Image (cartoon, rainbow, N blue to C red):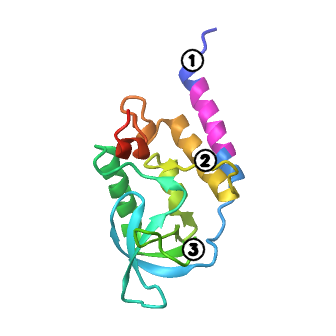
Amino acid sequence: MRINWYWVRSLLLLSLWWTVVGCTATAAPPPGIDVTIDRVISGQTVIVRGIPTDPTAAYTIRLQGIHAPDLQQVPWGETARQALETQLRSTPTATLVLNRAEPDVYDRYWGDLWQGNEWINRWLVAQGHVLATFTPHPSPPAQELSHAQDYARMRGAGLWNPDAPLRQTPAEFRRGTP
């Protein structure tokens, strides 16, 4: 009897996918601010409007827990930006959950974006468009991003495509290190 390894691998990946997806409850987004997406800057940065303190002002939001390839990391940076833009274009409103109320030194606010029950930060990682950041003692959301990255890596999605993988992290690229 000859074993068809393609089917064995496919069944194992499908089982693992069901384990990851099945064990991850799709929860409603935490309480946040309903905003309108004005523009997508990169695979991790968007401009939003609708913050209650000044509804017409544009605010720069950096999605937390992820690192998108630099736009100059061709083709991955532009692919991540386009994927985020396409996803957010389907419903131009989102729920923003801010990490902190004050902007960083670049005048960006850090947070999570949700479209309905879809956590956009996790979606980008699971699709293989961005990398999850890691901390020494990960929180439950950071662990969820890590699992999403494992899922993308197993599938060879996006940055993890074995024929054209991302060879430098965004931080390495910006530092100019190989």
Q: Which residue is mark 1?
A: 4
* Magenta-span inclusion, residue 14: yes
Residue at image x 42%, y 34%?
Answer: 161
Q: Earlier in the sequence, mark 3 or mark 1?
A: 1
Q: Earlier in the sequence, mark 2 or mark 1?
A: 1
Q: Amino acid at mark 3?
A: Arg
Q: Amino acid at mark 2?
A: Ser
Q: Which residue is mark 3?
A: 100
Q: Earlier in the sequence, mark 2 or mark 3?
A: 3
Residue 110 coordinates in the image, percent (x, y) = 50, 68
Residue at image x 64%, y 73%?
Answer: 30
Left/right of residue 133 with respect to residue 172 in the rendered view: right
Q: CA distance from mark 2 to mark 3?
A: 22 Å
Q: Which residue is mark 2?
A: 146
Residue 150 coordinates in the image, percent (x, y) = 58, 41
Residue at image x 36%, y 46%?
Answer: 174
Classify mark 1: helix, strand or loop.
loop
Q: Amino acid at mark 1?
A: Asn
Left/right of residue 31 with respect to residue 86 in the rendered view: right
Q: Say the numbered circle drawn on residue 73.
A: none
Label 3: how many Cα within 10 Å (few below 14, some 14–19, many 20+): few
Marks 3 and 1: CB-CB under 8 Å?
no
Is 106 rendered above or below residue 19?
A: below
Q: Which residues are magenta?
A: 8-19
Residue 69 coordinates in the image, percent (x, y) = 38, 48
Q: Nearer the viewer, residue 155 or 72?
A: 72
Q: Nearer the viewer, residue 62 or 176?
A: 176
| Rendered image quadrant of residue 141 | bottom right
